[in-house]
């Protein structure tokens, strides 16, 4: 039996962890074995994300303390949550890939910067390309108009050279 002080300590710890998080993903881990959860934790840790299992009642108290009542709708049944203050897209991507390997894991929902996310939205967040790819697309977007201008200018120069060449041939034949 857990004492009231121990429960308050757990609520304080959970509230402290969630207060720092920009993204919180609530999952149902039913059907995952210890090896699967360990694999998930390891992959999340690589992306600076933590995965925690806590009692729903204690998590509800922590959420109320932080003003995250929006999360309470997802706290039914066996529940674990992942949270990060780092890149939210990377954490969502881990769940997207992990869910393909382990179908037992299901995403219940989450919160990103105070906004409730449904499971489909978390999956969509995970499908966003990595930062490097997005930066490359932005750079190519900047490069495209310049490349187009260079091609147009080069085309005009090419036509000028062809015209001058035609004039020179006419003078030679005349």
Image (cartoon, helix red, strand yellow):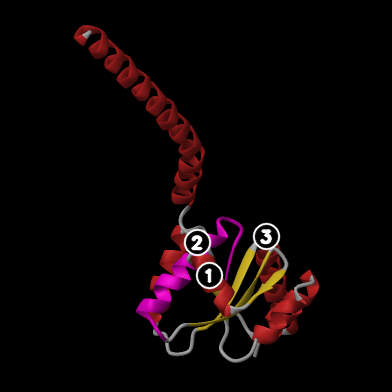
Residue depicted at 26% across the width and 8% down the height:
171
Q: Which of the numbered marks, if any, corresponds to residue 34?
A: none
Q: Are marks 1 and 2 in contact (CB under 8 Å)?
A: yes
Residue depicted at 30% across the width and 13% down the height:
167
Answer with mark 2 or mark 3, whichever residue precedes in sequence: 3
As drawn, 2 above or below 133:
below
User: What residue does disc 1 label?
Assistant: 124
Choose top left, top right, bottom left or bottom right for residue 34: bottom left
Asked whether 60 or 123 is in front, the reply is 123
Residue depicted at 67% across the width and 60% down the height:
20
Q: Which residue is situated farthest in the front direction here?
A: 174
Determine if the magenta segment contains residue 100. Answer: yes
Asked whether 78 or 123 is in front, the reply is 123
**Main SS, magenta residues:** helix
Residue density around tag 1, few if under 14, some if 14–19, many if 20 or more, within 10 Å: some
Separation of marks 1 and 3 at Cα, in angstroms: 23 Å
* Residues in magenta, as a range: 82-103
Left/right of residue 65 with respect to residue 7 in the rendered view? right
Asked whether 111 or 126 is in front, the reply is 126
The answer to whether residue 81 of the structure is visible from this angle is no
Separation of marks 1 and 2 at Cα, in angstroms: 7 Å
Residue 166 position, x and y percent, is 28, 17
Residue depicted at 74% across the width and 83% down the height:
4
Residue density around tag 3, few if under 14, some if 14–19, many if 20 or more, within 10 Å: few
Q: Which of the numbered marks, if any, corresponds to residue 20?
A: 3
Answer with mark 1 or mark 3, whichever residue precedes in sequence: 3
Residue 33 position, x and y percent, is 39, 85
Determine if the magenta segment contains residue 99. Answer: yes
User: What residue does disc 2 label?
Assistant: 128
**SS type, badge 2:** loop
């Amino acid at each position: 039996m857990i004492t009231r002080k121990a429960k308050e300590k757990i609520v304080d710890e959970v509230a402290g962890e969630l207060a720092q998080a920009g993204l919180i993903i609530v999952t149902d881990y039913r059907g995952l074995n210890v090896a699967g959860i360990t694999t998930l934790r390891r992959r999340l840790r690589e992306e600076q994300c933590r995965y925690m299992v806590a009692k729903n009642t204690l998590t509800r108290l922590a959420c109320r303390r932080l003003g995250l009542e929006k999360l309470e709708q997802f706290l039914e049944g066996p529940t674990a949550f992942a949270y990060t203050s780092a890149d939210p897209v990377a954490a969502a991507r881990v769940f997207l890939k992990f869910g393909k390997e382990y179908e037992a894991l299901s995403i219940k929902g989450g919160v990103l910067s105070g906004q409730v996310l449904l499971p489909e939205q978390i999956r969509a967040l995970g499908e966003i390309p990595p930062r490097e790819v997005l930066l490359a697309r932005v750079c190519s977007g900047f490069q495209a108009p310049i490349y187009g201008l260079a091609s147009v200018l080069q085309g005009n120069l090419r036509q000028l050279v062809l015209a001058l060449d035609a004039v020179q041939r006419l003078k030679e034949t005349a």
